[in-house]
Image (cartoon, grey):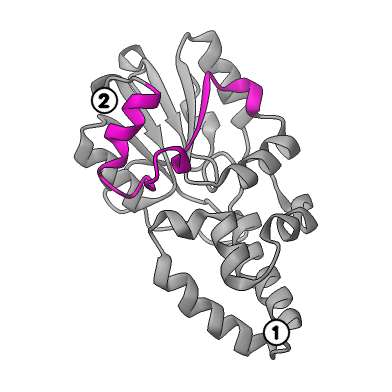
Amino acid sequence: MIAWETIHTVLLDMDGTLLDLHFDNHFWLEHVPQRYAEKHRLALDAARDRLASRYAAVAGTIDWYCVDYWTRELDLDIAFLKAEVAHLIAIHPDVVEFLERLRHAGKRAVLVTNAHHKSLALKMEKTGLHGYFDAVISAHQTGLPKENPAFWDKLQTLETFDPAHTLLIDDSLPVLRSAQGYGIAHLLAIYKPDTKLPEKDVGEFAAIGRFGEIFP
C-alpha cells in the first residue's frame, strides 16, 4: 500500500488516528453535556441541544479545538473535565510498534494535531507517545486548523517537508482533502477512528484498519 522507499516524512494526526476517538466523542457528546446541565440547571436533553448548535457554529475553525475558548464560552473548566475521563484515552492497535519501525527505517515522524496544547499534554502524559516523534506540532501554533488550505504553508515554517515525499495519515476527510490540494502525495485515512462505532466512509482515500497493515 505504501512505497516506503519514496517516503521521507510521515505526518501523523492524533485523535482518531493514533488514539481512539471514543475519548473525544464521549467527552463532547456525553460528559460535557452532563456537566453543562448540572452547572446551568438544565435537563440533559436541553443541554445537548444547546451545545449541538454551539458546536456547529465553530466546527472546522481553530476555536472548535481550543480548550480555552470552550472554558470561556461554556463557563466550564474544560481541561479539568477532560482529566475526569482521562481513563478513556487509549492508543489504537499497533501504533507503538509502527512508530518504532518508522524510527528504525529512518523516517521522520511528526505529530501534527489540531488539539489544543492542554489536550495534547494530557494525552501525551497518559499514553507516553511523546518520545516517539521527531517533532510535535499543534495547529494552534499556526492559528489555523488543518482543514484550512493555508495551514500547510504555515506548517512549513515549523517543519520543513517535501510534499512529494511525505505521507499524511489522518482520520478527517476535510484534512486529507486540504492536504491533497496542497500537493502531499501520499495520503491514508482511518476506517475506525472510534472503536465503538462502525467503520466510516473514507471517501476517495485509501485507508487502514490498523497500523500493522503498513509497517515499514
Q: Using residue 155 as the reference point, say whether residue 115 is left or right of it.
A: right
Label 1's element?
helix
**Which residue is tagged 2?**
163
Residue 1 can be seen, yes or no: no
Q: Residue at x 47, y 46 (%)?
A: 114
**Which residue is tagged 1?**
40
Decide: is 206 above or below 160: below
Decide: is 143 above or below 135: below
Q: How many labels does the image show?
A: 2
Q: Which of marks 1 and 2 is nearer the N terminus?
A: 1
Decide: is 46 above or below 154: below
Q: Percent x, y for residue 204?
A: 26, 49
Please report the bounds of the magenta region as a residue range.
Answer: 130-159
The answer to which image quadrant residue 152 occupies is: top left
Closest to the camera, between mark 1 and mark 2, is: 1
Measure the C-alpha gap from mark 1 to mark 2: 48 Å
Q: Percent x, y for residue 129?
A: 66, 29
Amino acid tagged 2: Pro
Decide: is 17 above or below 96: below
Nearest the viewer among 81 and 77 is 77
Q: Residues within 10 Å of mark 2 (few under 14, many from 20)?
A: some
Label 2's element?
helix
